[in-house]
Image (cartoon, rainbow, N blue to C red):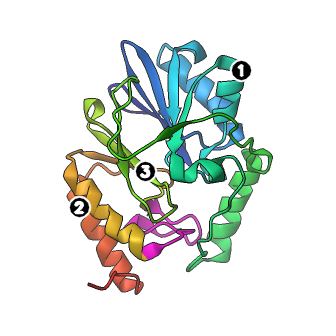
Amino acid sequence: MKLAPSLHRVGNDIIAAYLVEDESGVTIIDAGLAGHWRDLIRELEIMGRQLGDVRGVIITHGDSDHLGFAEKLRDEYGVPLYIHEADAKRARGEEKGSGSFGKFTIAATAGFLAYVIRKGGVRTRYLTEVHTLHDGDVLDLPGNPRIIGMPGHSPGSIAVFVPAVDAVFVGDALTTRNVLNGKTGPQPAPFTDVPVQALESLGRLGEVEATWVLPGHGAPWNGGIAGAISAIRTAAATDGEQPRH
C-alpha cells in the first residue's frame, strides 16, 4: 500500500511493516509475521523493486509480531538487521515481555489471534545475528533513519524518524488500534511492560516534526505528532494509566 511518495506499508491495520525508498534502495521498518513475506515481495514489485534492493531492516522492538520475515531476509539475502541492544535478547527468543492484556473483548482478541495464525505467527524465526542500536543513532540506510529511544513497551522499544518521508515509525510505543478490544485512534498499546514509562517516553517524539505517525498496529496517522500524543494522554487518563508527577 502506497502511503506517500517513497513510503509504503505491508500488512494492514492489525499488523503492519513499512518500506522507505530512495535512489540507493529500500529500508524496511519492522517485519510483521512470517506470512507477510509474499506481501513484501508484491509491494516491492509495485515499487519497481526486488529483494536485492533491501539494504536493511530496523526492528522497533523484539516482540514476535515484528520479527516475521526479518531472519529470512538476513539468512537468504544477507540483509542486515538492526534492533536496540536492550531488546536483542527478546528478538533472539531468550526473553519474553511482561505486559498485560488490559481491557479486551472476545471478538477482537479472537480476530487478532486468527490473523496471527493465518499469517504464520506460530512459526516465528527468532533473530540470530543483529546490529545493535542506541538512542540518537543515524543509520547509513535509505532515508537516513534516526533512532529515538522509547522504553516502556519494552526496554529497547524505539521510534524511527525518517525526515525524507515526513514520518516517524513508532512500533508499539503507541497504537491507533487496540488489537485486543478493537478501539481505534491514538492510545497506549497493549502488552506494554511498563505503561507509565511508555507514556513518559512519548515526550521524546516532541523532539521531531513529522506529519505521519506510523504504528505497528492500527491505521496510519497523518494528523501530526502533537495531535497523536494529546489523544494518547487523554485515552490513558480515561483508563487510569496517566503517569503521576
**Which residue type carries mark 1?**
Glu
Quarter of the rendering containing residue 205: bottom left
Pointer 2: what residue? 227
Which numbered tag is attached to residue 158? 3
Nearer-N-terminus badge (1/3): 1
Q: How far separated are the C-alphas under marks 3 and 2?
A: 20 Å
Q: How far separated are the C-alphas under marks 1 and 2?
A: 41 Å
Nearer-N-terminus badge (3/2): 3
Name the element at disc 2. Answer: helix
Pointer 1: what residue? 76
Which residue: 68% across, 39% down? Answer: 127
> What residue range appears in magenta?
175-195
Report the front residue among 171 and 61. 61
Report the front residue among 86 and 148. 86
Residue 135 spot, x, y in % from top left: 36, 47
Q: Is residue 52 left or right of residue 72?
A: left
Name the element at disc 1. Answer: helix
